[in-house]
Amino acid sequence: MEYLAYSLMDSAYAEATKDTEFSLPEMKLKLNWNRNFKSAWLTFASIGALFAILAQAQTASAAYYGPGSNYYVRTNGSDLIVRRGPGENYGAIASYRNGSRLPRVVAYRNGFARLSNGYYVAANWIGNRPGRGYTPGPGVGGPTTLNLGAEGSAVARLQRILGVTPTGYYGPGTQSAVRNYQLRNGLRVDGIAGPETLASLGY
């Protein structure tokens, strides 16, 4: 019965619309390939730049776990060098041993984490779980430069190599010992234990 009703409705509709003409609007699509290609290239370049920026932001914030989190040194076993500023050109003043709990991280700059004590460490060597093991060596986080006022295990190691009492503080006595070593070994005499002096010492 339903089938009969539907077929009658379809026949009636076909009869009513047999002379009706449908006209669709005509669309003309003109492509200016030179302009469109440049726009597409610009779009892809913009998307690529956005991905590059996001990747850098992710790298820079990879070790940031939010305020109030505990941060630890997570290296390959070496000490983590502490610097006066956010870059390898800033002098090393101390080092934290692998697995040590760090002061609170308050900011990031140039791939370095600023600690609540005002000093900086390389952000890629910190995490929310402590690292394991210890490997003696110069440390990670950029080349080591030790000078007057530096402190920590890196200074104590230098003092042991120089035959100075290992206090862990780079004072006038350590500076004098470094100057004497530099003078005896044909190095630039400045009292600063930079990469060249440290390499000569077998540091």
Image (cartoon, rainbow, N blue to C red):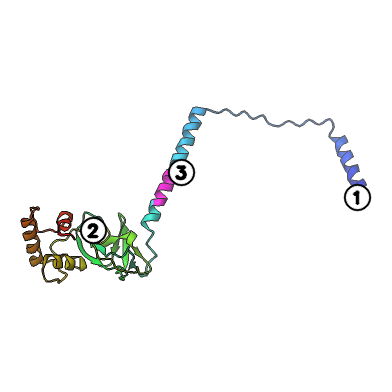
Name the mark nearer the viewer: 2 or 1.
2
Secondary structure under tag 3 reads helix
Sequence-wise, the earlier of marks 2 and 3 is 3
Instruction: Answer above or below: position of 130 versus 52.
Output: below
Sequence-wise, the earlier of marks 2 and 1 is 1
Return the x and y of residue 13 as percentages of the image width and height. Answer: 86, 39
Secondary structure under tag 1 reads helix
**Image point 18% across, 55% down: which residue?**
195
What amino acid type is highlighted by mark number 2? Gly
Residue matched to label 3? 47
Secondary structure under tag 2 reads loop
| First to last magenta residue range | 48-55
Residue 53 lies in the magenta stretch: yes
Residue matched to label 2? 85
Quarter location, residue 116: bottom left
Return the x and y of residue 138 as percentages of the image width and height. Answer: 23, 61
- Callout 3 environment at 10 Å: few (<14), some (14 to 19), or many (20+)? few
**Image point 21% across, 58% down: which residue?**
144
Return the x and y of residue 200 as percentages of the image width and height. Answer: 15, 56
Query: Which mark, residue 2?
Result: 1
Name the mark nearer the viewer: 1 or 3.
3
